[in-house]
Image (spheres, rainbow, N blue to C red):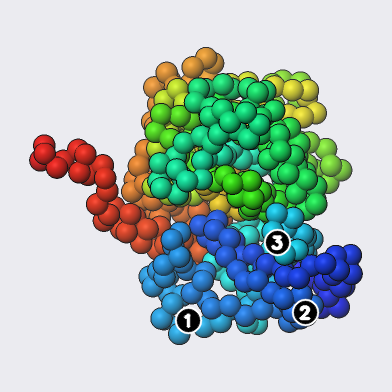
Amino acid sequence: MSNRRPEQATAEAEAFLAANPDIENVHIVLTSINGVCRGKSLRRSEVERLYREGRLIAGSILGLDITGADVVETGLVWDDGDADRLLRPIPGTLVRAPWLTPPTGQVLVAPSELDGSPHPADPRRVLARVIDRFAEMKLTPVIAIELEFYLLDRESALAGKARPPALPKTGYRPHQMQAYDLSDLEDLSPVIADIYHACDVQGLPAETVLSEYSPAQFEIVLRHRADAIRAADEAVMYKRLVKGVASKHGYEATFMAKPYTDLSGSGMHIHISLADESGTNVFAAEDPAGTPMMRHAIGGLIAAMAESVGIFAPNANSYRRFRGNSYAPISPCWGINNRTVSVRVPAGPAESRHIEHRVAGADANPYLAAAAALAAVHHGITAKLDPGKPVVGNGYAIKREPLPSNWYTAMDLTERSRFLRDYFGERFMEIYCAIKRAEQDRFFSQVTELDFAWYLRTA
């Protein structure tokens, strides 16, 4: 949401093109409700016009399901004649995409109505609505978004049979769980080096890389930002970047929540603190449980968690990740320095005190996952909610009401949630739920190989 004058916006395009005389095309990248990047490829000569006038796009694009099919129930297809909407560039996101040839740039765009008013299906605008609530309290959310992903053998993945890739330096195909394995990092150093290079080119704050719990599963930490919208922009750019670089090296990178039945899922961990007008962390305390405000924030996260699972776990595959003793949470609980809970307070010095929200899968839309978590934090603080006592020991062994374990139950709660409609907006929730209901119907109407394996001879 930019208030910049057209000449200011055009100056950004002019500076980029002058600094990158070899650029031939620029991809405009629209993040859909599902987190899918859709858009167009512009010729170099069209870029300045994009910044002056915006770019028209069919409004039905904002109501597609994850497969790209129209969802007429959104009211964005036939009801308004598939009317055009306007795309505007997001300041600071015009960068090179170094994995693409010929030399190509990319820019994130946000949709609006033709009169410039926000479009209700824009997930970035949903996050902005939530942040506005904190501005009224003179508080600024500080967040970091951590995303786990798998590298897969391309041929197997495209055939629907995921398996780890052969490592480029040795040809070895990892198959064992080797958390924090340096050998995998060393063998895949050409890929990782290219990811870091692309992050540097795009200005993404990529830091530590680690080999996760399962073979060819990785996480590269993105540094926290005192601009939650920018942090979510960077998460979107990072996912696209990782997929692009992996493809350049002959692999498939996937952020799906659970690509393997018997291995760990991939999560999106959202780290949250709040800064006051002086930039001081209002959660900072020598007590590992944080300040009263932090405990109220945790209380909000616990209270709103079940009805928000339809946002944190937006797809059928998302629910395969929620299993006991899996490092994915199964109930709304919190703990200090404890990875068996859904809301963790990490160890660290007092000034770094913050919350790690561990529910969302890597397949969630970063804007919406951050918005849902921050909305719950705001709700907890304003209502002064008590989170109860922290879990000590194994959170999976604690008896409490579980989180929704299937897509239908989760979406029932999300669709009825007054909390989400308040923070996200009525019209957005109508569109979101219409898309998810259409996806459910299509997904569960398919007859799969498993149907035959289980029922062909037994039914």
Residue neighbourhood size for the residue with mark 2, other residues' Cα within 10 Å, grouped as few (<14), some (14–19), many (≥20): few
In-front residue for pair 255/270:
255
Q: Quadrant of residue 424?
A: bottom right
Q: Horizontal and vertical percent for residue 15?
A: 88, 68
- Asked which secondary structure carries label 2, the reply is helix
Say whether marks 3 and 2 touch (CB < 8 Å): no
- Asked which secondary structure carries label 3, the reply is loop
Q: Quadrant of residue 81?
A: bottom left
Q: Amino acid at mark 1?
A: Asp
Q: Quadrant of residue 13?
A: bottom right
Say whether marks 1 and 3 touch (CB < 8 Å): no
Residue hosting label 3: 101
Instruction: Name the mark on residue 45.
Output: 2
The tag earlier along the polypeptide, 1 or 3, is 1
Q: Please tell me whether mark 2 or mark 1 is closer to you in this view.
A: 2
Q: Horizontal and vertical percent for residue 8?
A: 86, 73
Relative height, residue 377 to residue 179 (above, below): below
Pick the quarter of the image with the C terminus: top left
Q: Amino acid at mark 3?
A: Thr
Q: Answer whether residue 234 is visible to the viewer in this image.
A: yes
Residue neighbourhood size for the residue with mark 1, other residues' Cα within 10 Å, grouped as few (<14), some (14–19), many (≥20): some
Q: Horizontal and vertical percent for residue 136?
A: 72, 54
Q: Amino acid at mark 2?
A: Ser
Task: Give the alpha-carbon distance from disc 1 to disc 3, as whole Å.
Answer: 33 Å
